[in-house]
Amino acid sequence: MPDYLTLDDVDVDGMDVLVRSDLNVPLENGAISDDFRIRAALPTLERLVDGGARVRVCTHLGRPDGPDPAYSLRPVADAMAALTEKEVGFETGGQITVMENTRFDPGETANDPTMAARLAEDVGLFVQDAFGSVHRAHASTVGVAELVRSVAGPLLVGELEAFGRFLVDPEVPYVVVLGGAKVSDKLGVIENLLPRVDVMLIGGGMCFTILKAKGEEVGTSLVEEDQLDSVKRFLDGPDSEKIILPVDVVIAKEFAETAEHKVTYVKEIPPGWTGLDVGRETNQLFASVIRTAETVFWNGPMGVFEWEPFRSGTEAIARAMAETTAFTAVGGGDSVAALRALGLESEVSHVSTGGGAGLELLEGRELPGVAVLSRWAGSRS
Ligand code: AMP
């Protein structure tokens, strides 16, 4: 039994409701390049308006150190207004009021009680719906939920239920696919997940530090020298045979979209070349592992998928995820974007709005923004 209340347990009619959504959208030159998170957040907000609530929604956007117009939520409010029939206001007014970036106040990341109290002012109910942020103990994820009666929103509940299938007796073989730039970001994840999975497929920039730790020549590929010892630790561990690394890679003369490039076996990477994607044999190998799995989670691109010549590894994973009948979930902005670009979003079992939060859940860690909701679990109305 989940240890939290949901919107099914409360009557919001006439109430001032504060929602913490994850509206942390990617921005390119000031414009929203992907509105996936706004679309995902809207059903909860609309349901609350329909239930008679006055809705305020807050979120962080990017990592500003203080007030910074480049990270204002105004464009998000405008984009939201275009996606819903409800009236949307920015900072004031509207059936849905989008508040300014929570990170404009340094109290947010410090989980400062003064900021939490400011957020809680005049609020009758707090709805935690920001799955992508509940792994952080901030004022808008934990502090405010200590002060106001709080419930888990439908988006959060859907995420927790989907991830539950990985946590409680996942159907085996259970395969995790990891990519992305840096191994340092994912060391904890690799170490904590390895004992739980049957196979871990690793590509992306992060595989080169691992390959180097295994004694391979990796040319000028992305290597975090200071992580080699930590990587050797899990390579020497009892579960190391569960890790499958690329056998071939797409290498380029330099780190550039238009650079000369070719495919080579990992064993034959020439000095001076840099690995920017996994190769065709690796695509087939990884796809065949995914095909035999019953439960698959994927986070992180296999290569520099932003550039067309180095996209095929990431696309191959997206296709394999879409084709298998296994229970599949995809997390992390880049992986989800790759899936969407191929129109395969509806072909996987679960598209997650969270990156880090999903990984922490799979590691078996408690998410502070979810844990705090338990204090209100007995307050059914
Ligand atoms: P992350 O933020 O750690 O999930 O990493 C995502 C980024 O990793 C993307 O922007 C990719 O371009 C980048 N990436 C993936 N593979 C490589 C690679 N082989 N070398 C350098 N960067 C990579």
Image (tube, rainbow, N blue to C red):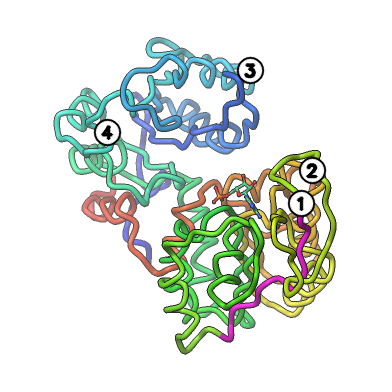
Label 2: how many Cα within 10 Å (few below 14, some 14–19, many 20+) = few
Tell me the residue that label 3 is attached to. 82
Could you give the CA–CA distance between mark 3 and mark 2, rounded to whole angstroms?
40 Å
Label 1: how many Cα within 10 Å (few below 14, some 14–19, many 20+) = many
**Dot label at residue 252:** 1
Q: Is residue 103 left or right of residue 209?
A: left
Q: Are marks 3 and 2 in contact (CB under 8 Å)?
A: no
- What's under tag 4, amino acid-wise? Glu
Residue occupying the point 65% across, 48% down: 336
Q: Is residue 356 visible?
A: yes
Quarter where residue 139 is shown: top left
User: Which region of the structure is painted magenta?
Assistant: 241-252
Mark 4 or mark 2: whose residue is earlier in sequence: 4
**Dot label at residue 259:** 2
Quarter where residue 121 is shown: top left
Picture coordinates of residue 381, whole percent (x, y): 28, 45
Could you give the CA–CA distance between mark 3 and mark 1, rounded to whole angstroms?
42 Å
- What's under tag 1, amino acid-wise? Ala
- What's under tag 2, amino acid-wise? Ala
Picture coordinates of residue 65, whole percent (x, y): 32, 27
Could you give the CA–CA distance between mark 1 and mark 2, rounded to whole angstroms?
6 Å
**Mark 3 or 4, closer to the camera:** 4
Q: Is residue 15 visible?
A: no
Check mark 1 vs ligand 1: CB closer than 8 Å? yes or no. Answer: no
